[in-house]
Image: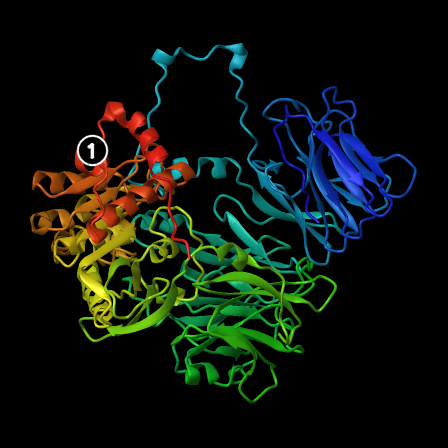
Amino acid sequence: MASTGVTTSERTYGTDLVLRDLAIGGEHTFPGVLDYSIARDGRTLLYSVSSRTQTENGVYAFTPGETFAPTALLAGRGRYTKLTWDREQTQATFVSDHGNTNQRSASARYTQYLWPRGAAEAKAVVTTKTKGLPADLVVSDRSTASFSRDGKKLYVGAAPPSKSSRRPGGATPPADEEKVTADLWHWRDGYVQSVQKVRASQERSRTYRGVLDLASGTYTQLADKTLPTVTLSDDGLRALGYDDRAYRARTDYDGRYSDVYVVDATTGTRKLVLSQLRSESGSSVQWSPDGKWGCYYQAQQWHLLDTATGKIQPLTAKVRLAFHNEDHDRPEPPSAYGSAGWTKDSASFLVYDRYDVWQFFPDGRAPRNVTAGEGRKQKIQFRVQRIEPFDADDDERGVDPMRPLTLRAESEVTRASGFFQTSFTATAAPTRLLWADKAHRYLGRAQEADVLLFSASRFDEFPDVYATDPSFAQPKKLTDGAAQMAAYAWGRSELLQFKNAEGVPLAATLIKPPGFDAKKKYPLIVYIYERLSQNVHNFVNPAPGTSINASFYASNGYLVLLPDIVYKTAQPGQSALRCVLPAIDAAARLGCVDEKAIGIQGHSWGGYQIAYMLTQTNRFRAAVAGAPVGNMTSAYSGIRWGSGSPRQFQYETGQSRIGRSLQAGTQAFLDNSPIFHIERVTTPVMMMANDHDDAVPWYQGIELFLALRRHGKPSWLFNYNNEFHGLRRRADQKDWARRMQQYFDHYLKGAPAPAWLEQGIPYIEREEEKEKFNAATPPVAADK
């Protein structure tokens, strides 16, 4: 069991730890505890002490139920932390600067200690003098060491020595007016300065993994600055290393890439086996439990790596089906449908196509469709559902081919879902266990009983928890979340089929108000992002947020439409228009839509699409766009301040889907930027662009607003001070939700315009306005 104590700075002293015997009620109190960890069998408590005097500092072992005092495994002045057990709980490790010079300064040196369970004391196993530890690295307290699965090897984190913050001779720092702080953006930097700033803390805490053979005492350094990331096989004999240095600059405008090495963990020898592995779904190499094989996804196929020889061979190429996302419509390589990983015996690897589960064999046997093609036949997506206990240790390494295989399934057509069962020897289609026109989610299993938990929901049905057995027979409802819904009127959701302007079959979620009357005309609000119809059975808790709440609006008499959108490269705005308007037409053909009262709302990518569509159509009576991009030409080289990443990748290969650089695709950038067509807008538009937006530069909202204002278009821009891309403060969420409701009620229902909509809010009166607004406009949900 990993340490559950809180790691704190050297000057922080521990707190009281209370160990209580739940059977008899007795308890022990241990003062000054900094870290602690209890063995899985409950018979040994390890804890470290940090006291003001430091004389009691150390790591102690205590056996509950016995009368003797805790045993000091190592004690004295110093810091003790990172307590970790091996898998079998037969030994533990920790780090300490005990006995090292300068131990109270930033340059303290740490030693890795090992304690065989039951031994009288811990022993030092990796020190600054350990052979094999590079001269420029030391044992670090920044990361927690771990054991190999068999407990024979210890994986240790090493790092460059910490730099002391003390100035030579006690000199004082320069006065503020003499201090210079400047960032240099160098064209040869791997990552631009904004990315380096975001990652600075992570880089200061970075460690490089080495492996200690506990039997021989041999230490081998595996990772360093040239190969910073390594993952080890279960037996600790080999590692896979990832080096992305040559490709870091490409992250500005493309994806992430790495060269992959096989590393001999006994010698540290490296062998390049794969160049330019792109960070797509499934792209990291997945170890087989026996460490002989690795599987990874690249260029629309899964591949097999022999970790002994470095030989690579295609795994899925002979099956004439797509194992990549067939609906992918971004100008970048499509991701994989995914995998269920290796079987426990390392004899096969489980891969998903669009619908079915496939079993591939490293020994060259013909692949096998585990679900017998039933998924493709019925357009049902089967995915392996692991049903191990809640607190299971990691004994189950991979899928056990000797046990029944549980599958979660979902219809691509109706979005009904449930659970099926098959086996690795079955030749027939999987057996249905539970199936309904609901969204089912597996939650977990009891540790010591064959009791499973799952939830089931619809738009109008709370996701209550059910208990059942592995056959999903006779589920028993354990919760009653629906009780809190009883006082309110709830809408119902359904799927609406339509085709976009180019004849592509699509679907939309249509949510109808309670007591829906097909002969009545209702105002309609469209909410957009990308594909949304898959959410038809999702329960939407009525709560304020960054976007409209479908349950709340349906309860208050609105139709809500969530259409699917598909895209063509270099035509993101036009693509949205070709999908959204036909979806509205399909809803209007039902005869229940008031076509003079259609509104639209979306945030981020949805906000951009709305801004573009308003320059091309007058179909909407009112629009709300959150965090919109108004000018792709200036947004292209903006910064996503949350990650520090330049936004170029978003347009060249990502969601914005231009597919080319600004210089190579200038016309596409101009065609898809709303501000260059703003004079065509006829729809009132309310926007939100927050000054701490960490994804979309907030000046994009300002550009769009100023363009609308310049041309005399009714427009409003809310900036929630110090807020981010999505609203985080509940007070701001409530304020925005209420203003959206007032805005849509005015334009779509004819309600009186609120004062802020007509008169604005002067800057010097904004605090007083907010107080009056909050007092006067409590949220309203329709009663039954």
Task: Give 522 or 77, whichever is nearer the viewer.
Answer: 522
Task: List the single residue furthest toward the bottom.
Answer: 427
Task: Describe residue 100's horizontal placement relative to residue 277 as left or right.
Answer: right
For mark 1, does the 10 Å Cα neighbourhood hold few (<14), some (14 to 19), or many (20 or more) residues?
Answer: few
Task: Give 509 or 67, whichever is nearer the viewer.
Answer: 509
Check disc 1 and report its element: helix, strand or loop.
loop
Q: Which residue is mark 1?
A: 760
Total number of numbered discs in the rendering: 1
Q: Amino acid at mark 1?
A: Gly
**Residue 2 spot, x, y in % from top left:** 68, 47
Tell me if residue 255 comes above or below residue 634 in the rendering: below
**Residue 389 spot, x, y in % from top left:** 67, 63
In which quadrant will I find the C terminus?
A: bottom left
Residue, x 22% and y 41% (percent of image)? 701
Task: Give 405 or 680, whichever is nearer the viewer.
Answer: 680
Residue, x 41% and y 60% (percent of image)? 490
Task: Describe residue 68's horizontal placement relative to residue 430 as left or right.
Answer: right
Task: Describe residue 29's horizontal placement relative to residue 677 as left or right.
Answer: right
Task: Describe residue 259's horizontal placement relative to residue 631 as left or right.
Answer: right
Task: Give 309 or 186, whichever is nearer the viewer.
Answer: 186
